[in-house]
Image (spheres, rainbow, N blue to C red):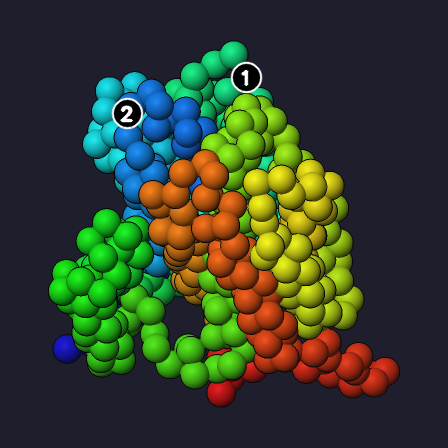
Amino acid sequence: MTTTPAHQNAHQKTEQDRRPPAPPVVSSARGRWTVLAVCCLSMFLVGLDTTIVNVGLPSIGRGLGVGTRALEWVVDAYTLVLAGLLISSGALADRFGRRRVFRCGLALFGVASLGCALAPSVGVLVAARALQGVGASMLSPVALAIVVNAMPDPKERARAIGIWASVFGLSMAVGPVTGGLLLTGLDWRALFWVNVPVVAAALLLSAVFVPESRAPRARRLDLPGQALLALLLTLVVGVLIEGPRIGRTSPTALAGYAGAVAVAAVFVRVESRRPEPLMDPRLFARPVFSGAVVGAVAVFVALNTALLLNTLYLQHTRDWSPAAAGAATLPLALGATVCAPWAGRMVGRRGPRTPLLLAGAFLTAGGLCLVRLTPHTSVYLLLAAYGLVGVGFGFANAPITDTAVDGLPAARAGVAGAITSTARQLGAALGIALAGGLVAGSGPAGLAHAARPGWAVVAACGVLLLAVAHFSPRKEAAPAPGAAPAPGPARARDAG
């Protein structure tokens, strides 16, 4: 059968229609940095809501008549759902459009914030916080993918990633300060009302400035892997939170431990056999990538353990107001603010190893300052410890994010960001669960002593980060004049 030119043209048009659209190019530098600013605004919101609630937990407890264990779920309902859905949200964005999913996440986050502000009971509040986590999961990896695609130049992209990581880290560091200010003259519901105008502004700006983009080849959704990951995270954090109530060696707790191990084994087995897994276990065979993930967990365990212990100790043991307890974390926020962009520049010049070593050293020192905490510990020592933790946190985020994103091709930037963000939120949930479990049931007089192991955990996370720095890549030597530049890590792996 003879094929006419008309048939050939029609066939070519059909094939072209099936191809994914080329990534949009933001031609001007101002346009690219505007896109980064919009994405950073949304990420500031996600990070802020991870920690802003901490300083208000005693007020929420009094307002709703609940104790420490229920308050842990108020925080971890958000972080658990966020951690469990991040990777699937990145895959959805690659398939259906990053701006579309990004704006859906913003809208859902805003509606859930209203639900939190109006919650009549702790059950409704926990459910609304979980819904917030669903919306936030559509923002974190998608925002990073949008930034990566808007910045085609490697040097410009590295600076943008550093800024993105700095803003996210800063948002978590200033959360307690912001929460303390909002609670001055207002009740705990103000912690959620503040999200509404920010969401409205982000929705407007994203409609005007953020271009639509998709991955060249979208991945399939891995529903079995998604269900197993969510179950695994819930089991691990649930046993940690409920352990003091049910008994850490009770049959129920032992069954929970065994269930978590079994689900983890099934998850690895299922994911290793799927053609497009939710989280490819083979990625973790690479020391650089797995080190970045472990480092992300450790940093956020340390941060959230420190923040929760600070809130409970200062407000319960020392009878400080929420505003004063939030203000006490100013050294932490200042350390993160100053050192986060500095770390981004260091990554560009020297590679991630030096800032990771600094992060580990400062976190270790901050934790060690308070391993002998008493009800009368000097305020100056408290502020110094919080400052050291903030400096360590600030130095950590940019090298961890840069290493993780560099571990996957640019087309899968959503997946790279999602895995790192999953590790961060898992660390946040574990930190809250560990700290809450240590002090649950402790009265004001005994809380300082009960918190000592938590500060030891902060120091141990710093030591772990020092070990992670050993596996981080060194800065590559500059090529000889006239020599072709070596491919970047992601391109080299693609070629292999």
Which of pointers 2 and 1 indicates the residue nearer the eye? 2
Q: Residues within 10 Å of mark 2 (few under 14, many from 20)?
A: few
Q: Which mark is residue 184?
A: 1
Residue located 36% across and 33% down the image: 109
In terms of secondary structure, where does tag 2 sit? loop
Q: Which mark is residue 300?
A: none
* Of 432 and 205, the residue lying toward us: 432
Regarding residue 28, the answer to whether it shows in the image is: no
Give percent across and percent down for residue 255.
Answer: 15, 66
Give percent across and percent down for residue 410.
Answer: 51, 65
Q: CA distance from mark 2 to mark 1?
A: 20 Å
Tell me which amino acid carries mark 2: Gly
Tell me which amino acid carries mark 1: Thr
Q: Quadrant of residue 118?
A: top left
* Of 304 and 46, the residue lying toward us: 304
Q: Earlier in the sequence, mark 2 or mark 1?
A: 2
Q: Residues within 10 Å of mark 1 (few under 14, many from 20)?
A: few
* Of 152 and 3, the residue lying toward us: 152
